[in-house]
Image (cartoon, rainbow, N blue to C red):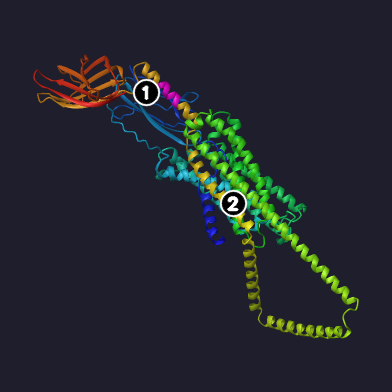
């Protein structure tokens, strides 16, 4: 059974290392994007005169560059000038060239949010009336594609590496000192350091392309790398690398001097003893106590510094109560590392620890207390972070962030329940060992009493003299034979010392295998292994949910954006310039001289009730042209309504308008346009439009 479980254990450990987000086990540190909460002109608005600038308002401060905001005319030409300015708070504006003609304009933006993620988007507004536009802005931002995937993977690997590095070291120092000389635990902690270092270097190289072009070729652009080093995120990544150098020294001392001291502090068999030493001796040696204190203090400082490199560059450093949120974020990350990283180390130790120094009940109990303290810290910091990111109870169910957070809370509850089962198995293991020790003591006492009684009987002369003499002769003969056998064996060993050494190693391996079988056959230890394995499995699912959560917009921001969009839509509907305008373009050919062209019909706001209608007629070359007559008819065939005639008024060359077109109900309306180019040449073209 143990051989079957071992591959699963290795798989789970690899998953814990690979699943990003190893950040969390309680509520996750907030890491989400900024959102566009407003603009001037508003999205979809139709303004009478050309604005002098375009302003964008975000949910939090963002970083902007020279090309962060672009305004394009209907032909795709840029009409913005100058760099974006930040006149106040979270509003950013870009000036426009003067004298812009009527038509539909596209605003495309790409900025970097406070949590270091690029945020891209686009919207349109119109001057005078909506028109056709050739602009096609891709919805793919720089964080999509290969560079975005690599950057996201690097983030998750860095989180996992930090958890394994900090949590594994904490497990050795606080729970199980013999782990400092266990190869499996050493590999786990070193793997965490390597993963975090490699991921940090990768993030530093990818950062420039990630926030600008998204092209893989720009990863090695030294100019972009220089720009990254000037940003807050770049400084945080460099600081992390410097702290990792200090972490390397910490690991060297932990698995060097501390491991040798832990090895000499007590005999190996004390690891399973009742004194609670787990191989740590009496704990009173001054040198060992000083080294342990120094490692604990130095390790805590380095771990806190590494955690701060995330807090100072991501969402905690911006928004509501940043001065409180940053230290809370650091505590949260340290608690996550102590729990999940310690759990990974315990899992490895239970299955891969040397036979001579197995994980004892005292080590499991210490980790249980450490995990309980971590859960308490996670609960307190998680409640604060949830309030900071959600802002209201309704956000739990009305936003995706809140829904994911509810799933996460449920998984944490399951994980705590499984941890409680592990605690019960630990107690059973301890009770079983106490019972075995009691039985062995009783048998030893009975043996001693029997030997004492035999000695008294012999001293009292109860044995016959002849028997005594015979016994003495026999003993002398046996002693002589034993001496001869011993001399022969010594001679054989002296003749073939290599064979003797091999035999000794075989005996040691056989004994180690026997002890391992006995240890694995313990039902209480097997139950503890299974419960810890289940706890690690829940942790993998929890981290997967967290991975999605870290990429989700906070509930507070999502609700603010929805409220701003609703307010903008309501305002636009009140002014008759809503974002629901419909524009239909239909080519026509009357068959006569100059009978070809294009007719466009705009309905605003394309809702039941009063609507404004505009008709534009252009020749084959795109210039406005006048025709003798234009007529409109609206038909709702599904309800047998229409055709409803509309006679627009001629406004200017190629432009007709009707200000109060009554549309009785919503539906799929057929819009028919009759164009007459001469006394005898005319044609009727049509398209359907969804009203309401």
Kindly tell me whether residue 187 is visible in this rendering: yes
Crowd tier of the residue under label 2, counting other residues whose Cα lies within 10 Å: few below 14, some 14–19, many 20 or above: many
Measure how far apart labels 2 and 1 are at the Cα level.
Answer: 65 Å
* Residue 564 counted in the magenta span: yes
For residue 122, side relative to residue 405 (left or right): left
The first of marks 2 and 1 along the sequence is: 1
Q: Position of residue 669 (x, y in %)?
A: 25, 24
Q: Which residue is mark 1?
A: 96
Read off the residue under disc 2: 531
Where does residue 623 sit, x and y in percent of width and height? 20, 23
Residue positioned 90% across, 79% down in the render: 461
> The N terminus appears in which quarter of the rendering?
bottom right
Callout count: 2
Which residues fall within the magenta stretch?
A: 562-568
Task: Determine the secondary structure under disc 1.
Answer: loop
- Among the 4 quarters of the image, the one containing residue 378: top right
Residue drawn 31% across the image and 26% down it: 73
Quarter of the rendering occupied by the C terminus: top left
Tell me the element at label 2. helix
Residue 351 on image: x %, y %: 59, 58
Residue 437 is a magenta residue: no
Predominant SS along the magenta part: helix
Name of the residue lying farthest toward the right: 460
Residue 20 against residue 264 in the figure, above or below: above
């Amino acid at each position: 059974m143990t051989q079957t479980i071992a591959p699963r254990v290795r798989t789970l450990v690899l998953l814990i290392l690979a699943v990003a987000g190893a950040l969390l086990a309680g509520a996750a540190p907030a890491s989400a994007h900024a959102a566009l909460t407003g603009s001037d002109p508003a999205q979809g608005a139709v303004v009478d005169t050309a604005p002098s600038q375009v302003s964008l308002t975000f949910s939090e401060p963002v970083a902007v560059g020279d090309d962060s905001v672009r305004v394009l005319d209907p032909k795709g030409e840029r009409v913005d000038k100058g760099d974006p300015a930040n006149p106040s708070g979270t509003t950013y504006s870009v000036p426009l060239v003067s004298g812009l003609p009527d038509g539909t304009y596209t605003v495309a933006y790409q900025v970097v949010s406070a949590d270091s993620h690029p945020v891209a988007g686009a919207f349109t507004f119109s001057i005078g009336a909506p028109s056709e536009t050739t602009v096609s802005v891709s919805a793919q931002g720089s964080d999509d594609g290969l560079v975005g995937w690599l950057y996201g993977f690097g983030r998750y690997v860095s989180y996992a590496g930090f958890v394994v590095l900090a949590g594994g070291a904490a497990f050795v120092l606080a729970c199980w000192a013999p782990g400092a000389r266990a190869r499996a635990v050493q590999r786990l902690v070193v793997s965490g350091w390597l993963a975090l270092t490699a991921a940090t270097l990768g993030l530093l190289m990818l950062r420039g392309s990630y926030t600008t072009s998204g092209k893989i070729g720009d990863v090695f652009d030294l100019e972009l790398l220089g720009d990254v080093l000037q940003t807050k995120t770049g400084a945080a990544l460099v600081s992390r690398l410097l702290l990792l150098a200090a972490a390397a020294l910490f690991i060297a001392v932990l698995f060097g001097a501390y491991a040798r001291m832990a090895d000499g502090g007590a005999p190996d068999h004390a690891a399973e003893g009742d004194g609670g030493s787990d191989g740590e001796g009496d704990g009173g040696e001054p040198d060992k106590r000083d080294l342990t204190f120094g490692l604990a203090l130095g390790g805590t400082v380095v771990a806190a510094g590494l955690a701060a490199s995330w807090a100072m560059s991501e969402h905690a450093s911006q928004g509501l109560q940043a001065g409180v949120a940053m230290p809370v974020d650091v505590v949260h990350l340290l608690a996550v590392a102590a729990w999940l990283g310690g759990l990974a180390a315990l899992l490895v130790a239970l299955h891969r620890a040397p036979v001579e120094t197995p994980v004892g009940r005292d080590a499991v109990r210490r980790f249980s207390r450490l995990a309980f303290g971590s859960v308490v810290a996670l609960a307190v910091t998680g409640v604060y972070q949830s309030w900071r990111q959600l802002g209201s109870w309704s956000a739990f169910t009305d936003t995706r962030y809140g829904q994911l957070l509810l799933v996460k809370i449920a998984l944490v509850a399951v994980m705590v329940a499984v941890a409680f089962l592990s605690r019960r198995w630990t107690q059973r293991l301890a009770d079983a060992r106490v019972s075995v020790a009691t039985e062995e003591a009783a048998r030893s006492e009975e043996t001693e009493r029997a030997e004492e009684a035999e000695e008294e009987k012999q001293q009292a002369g109860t044995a016959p003299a002849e028997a005594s003499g015979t016994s003495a002769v026999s003993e002398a003969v046996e002693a002589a034979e034993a001496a001869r056998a011993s001399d022969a064996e010594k001679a054989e060993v002296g003749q073939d010392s290599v064979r003797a050494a091999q035999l000794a190693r075989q005996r040691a391996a056989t004994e180690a295998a026997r002890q391992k079988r006995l240890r694995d056959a313990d039902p209480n230890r097997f139950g503890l292994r299974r419960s810890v394995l289940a706890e690690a499995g829940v942790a993998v699912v929890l981290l997967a949910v967290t991975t999605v959560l870290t990429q989700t917009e906070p509930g507070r921001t999502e609700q603010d954006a929805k409220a701003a969009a609703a307010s903008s839509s309501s305002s636009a509907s009140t002014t008759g310039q809503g974002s629901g305008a419909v524009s239909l373009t239909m080519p026509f050919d009357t068959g006569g001289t100059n009978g070809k062209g294009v007719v466009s019909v705009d309905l605003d706001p394309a809702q039941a009730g009063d609507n404004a209608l505009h008709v534009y007629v252009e020749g084959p070359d795109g210039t406005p042209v006048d025709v003798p007559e234009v007529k409109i008819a609206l038909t709702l065939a599904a309800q047998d309504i229409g055709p409803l005639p509309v006679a627009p008024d001629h406004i200017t060359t190629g432009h007709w308008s009707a200000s109060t077109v009554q549309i009785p109900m919503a539906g799929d309306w057929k819009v028919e346009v009759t164009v007459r180019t001469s006394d005898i040449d005319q044609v009727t073209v049509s398209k359907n439009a969804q009203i309401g």
